[in-house]
Amino acid sequence: QVQLVESGGGLVQAGGSLRLSCAASGIIFSSYDMGWYRQAPGKQRESIASITRGGTVNYADSVKGRFTLSRDNAKSTADLQMNSLKPEDTAVYYCNARRWRDNYVYWGQGTQVTVSS
């Protein structure tokens, strides 16, 4: 059974930091691209960061320079370091695993991040 479990969300003041972690099980982690998405109330889910199997990272403009995504294939984890948080970063954050060759896609259950002003 495939599981993606996010952790590390919470309440933080503007300017603060949080580190989200996504722990995967039931998949060959190194064969999947990993991504983080977020969904704010009343808005569509958006991609904010992704990392390929080879370690290439891409960021949405809204988080570039503030968020850092990394992966540890030995631990099957993908961590999102979030610095200089803003109230507009408030959302439910989801972890995503995708294997492009056969379009297998898995999602975590989400973790709430709330940034107070």
Image (spheres, rainbow, N blue to C red):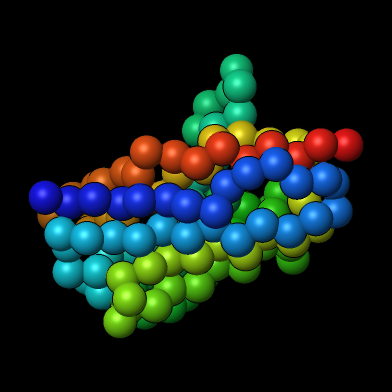
Where does the image place residue 28, in percent across and percent down from the top left? 17, 69
Q: Residue at x 32, y 44 (%)?
A: 107
Q: Residue at x 70, y 41 (%)?
A: 11
Give residue 74's quadrant in the image. Answer: bottom left
| Rendered position, 12 above or below 20 | above
Q: Residue at x 31, y 51 (%)?
A: 4
Q: Residue at x 25, y 69 (%)?
A: 29
Q: In the drawing, does residue 8 fall left or right of residue 101? A: right
Quadrant housing the C terminus:
top right
Give residue 90's quadrant in the image. Answer: top right
Where does the image place residue 99, in percent across and percent down from the top left? 23, 59
Where does the image place residue 12, in percent across and percent down from the top left? 75, 46
Where does the image place residue 106, in percent across and percent down from the top left? 26, 47
Q: Nearer the viewer, residue 47 or 38?
A: 38
Q: Could you tell me how many numbered marks the image carries? A: 0
Q: In the drawing, does residue 45 fall left or right of residue 107? A: right
